[in-house]
Amino acid sequence: AIVAAQYGDTIWVAQGTYLPTTGTNRFISFTLKNGVQMFGGFAGTESSLDERDWEANPTVLSGDIGVPGDSTDNSYNVVFCNLADSTTVLDGFVITGGNADNDSSGPTTTRPKSGGGLHLVGSSQAQDTRPVIRNCRFIGNHARFNGGGMFVRTVLGAGATPTLINCEFRDNSAARGGGVYREGGSVMFEMHITKCKFINNQAFHGGGLYVI
């Protein structure tokens, strides 16, 4: 559905657990598509968005590929996002089991090392990466270096300013930013975090939130 979606499309996702791949390639993630709105939490009988109950019908995006229950072969990042404007929405999902634990040499901000739950990067100087993340729970994700639950970073001259509304970051871990790690900024927009909870996240620096 994500592959087929075009700018302006909306995807409704029924309750259940979904994996980014049926194989064992840890580099594969659910990749947000620019201008596409994704809503979880449906029982499957709704005819309008207002009828869904995302708390009663958990829609889980899980990185637990490979051997079930073995985190060492999980997806590095459950969700990946780059070059998405503010019409891009992820709403009503549980994001869990991402494990960006790669310990190879090189930059610590790469996907295999940061952003177990969501790895969001702004690399376009033409526009900010500004998805809306709403009613989502980031639970039990890990990164060896930055952003166990969510990693947000910009490159020189670009911007990444997601909006987080009514989200929960629980039991995530990393060296920096157990819940959320944010590096860089924007001269055009701000990153907004509204009505979110940070609970029992762990890090050497910034258990809940680390901003540099």
Image (cartoon, helix red, strand yellow):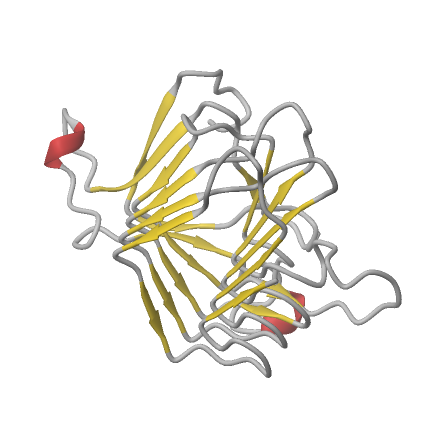
What is the quadrant of residue 11 in the picture?
top left
Relative to 7, is 182 above or below? below
Relative to 127, is 148 above or below? below
Residue closer to the observer: 162 or 24: 162
Seen at 58% across and 79% down, the residue is 205
Q: Is residue 123 left or right of residue 162?
A: right
Q: Quadrant of the C terminus?
A: bottom right
Residue furthest to the right: 105
What is the quadrant of residue 70 in the picture?
bottom right
Relative to 33, is 90 above or below? below
Seen at 59% across and 67% down, the residue is 67
- On the image, the x and y values in percent for residue 4 come to 51, 20
Seen at 70% across and 50% down, the residue is 27
Q: Is residue 202 left or right of residue 77?
A: left
- On the image, the x and y values in percent for residue 49 come to 18, 30
Residue furthest to the bottom: 204
Residue closer to the observer: 124 or 45: 124
Q: Is residue 146 left or right of residue 117?
A: right
- On the image, the x and y values in percent for residue 167 come to 32, 56
Residue closer to the observer: 156 or 61: 156
- On the image, the x and y values in percent for residue 41 come to 25, 44
Residue furthest to the left: 51
Residue furthest to the front: 187
How many numbered discs? Answer: 0
